[in-house]
Amino acid sequence: MLRRTAWTVGALLASTVMSVAPALVPAHATAPAPITIAFTGDDLGSPALWPAARRNADGHGLDFRPMLARLRPLIRSADLAICHLETPLSGPGVSPSGSPRYVAPHQLATAIRFAGYDGCSTASNHTLDAGTAGIRSTLDALDALDLSHTGSARTKAEARSIVRYQVGDVGVAHLAYTFGFNGLRPKQPWMANRIWPDAIIARAERSRREGADLVVVSLHWGQELSHAASPDQDRIARRLASSGSIDLIVGHHAHVVQRIRRSAGQWVAFGAGNSLTGMTAREYVPDVQDGMVVLATFAPTADGWQVSGIRFAPTWVQPGPFIVRLVGPALDRGSLPPALMEELRRSWARTVGIVAAPAIGVKPFRGARL
């Protein structure tokens, strides 16, 4: 497993110059190894989860780590892992709350770090639910655990910086945007990123100029509870992919999985579904408990890096303890009660039925580690 660090592109000018300048590679040099990046869908620390988190902590605060523990082997085995934090996190002056203005307890960040993530996208329709203070408390909580973040910002300088992960010799820039904020407006436009294709492309091009080998974009978009990509999703995906400056798009917001397909020659995972959620079939549809880990492998080519393979590992959230289970390994072990095994079989069938496309190489991944 590679060790990762994250830094802003603009801050390391010397490294930027070196990475942009052409390099002379000896004929006998070994080609860089491929890297795999893992992405997951919505993490929703809603009040439905809190009683289970209290039980996990034996009455001493809240502990969300057992909910993500089954994801940990796969997430940690990726070279880079990125989550999507849909709700703000609590902090000084910002209390946890539920609908319609969500604030998750800050202990959720501890669970995200425990699971092995390196960073998160924070642009969603709930980014402004706790206002400016909520943006600050969220990013402060992530910073305290050395979790990188993009999509919202506390200062104009932070908003201008580009988050870049260094994975071995590969610089990966991560950008994040949302369709809107449920009618709310930030005090300053730079505080939270809206989906404006031209602006996204300009930022991706800047990432390239400043040394990024790969640019991946997280988009909060689409229609809730719809497995089908909306016309807007298709239009935006084509526009971004055809720019030639973006290597992969991963989406969330629909709370159900959506397809993984090519658009203008680039891969788009339109919707990764829910990762950690208190949404259940009783209130919605069974599909809200489904999600997936999107596993994109990038390999070096003569012109740089590109996606050489894309897989997905179906996940399912067990109501009650709200454990996020990797469906394939749980099915293979067969050690859970019959009723849970049947739910897992149904979840696997739903997710694979929507997402898989063997003819173009989109296949389910069944293991617990890469």
Image: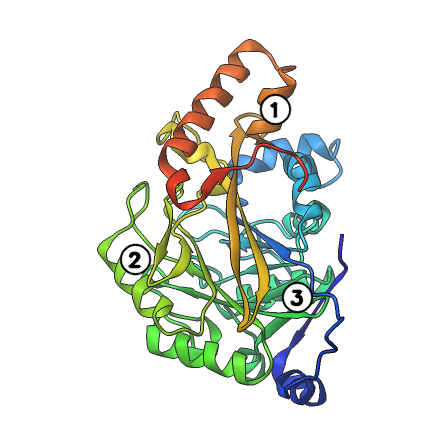
Q: Quadrant of residue 259?
A: top left
Please provide percent x and percent y for residue 311.
51, 44
Q: Which residue occupies 75% across, 31% down?
A: 58
Q: Quadrant of the C terminus?
A: top right
Q: Which residue occupies 72% across, 75% down?
A: 27
The answer to whether residue 336 is above or below residue 130 is above
Secondary element at image label 3: helix
Amino acid under disc 3: Asp
- Res 330 label: 1
**Which residue is most to the left?**
231
Task: Name the side, left or right, on which 170 lies relative to 184.
Answer: right
Between residue 82 and residue 188, name the one nearer to us: 82
Q: Which residue is mark 2?
A: 233
Q: Which residue is mark 3?
A: 140
Label 3 neighbour load within 10 Å: few <14, some 14-19, many 20+: some
Label 2 neighbour load within 10 Å: few <14, some 14-19, many 20+: some
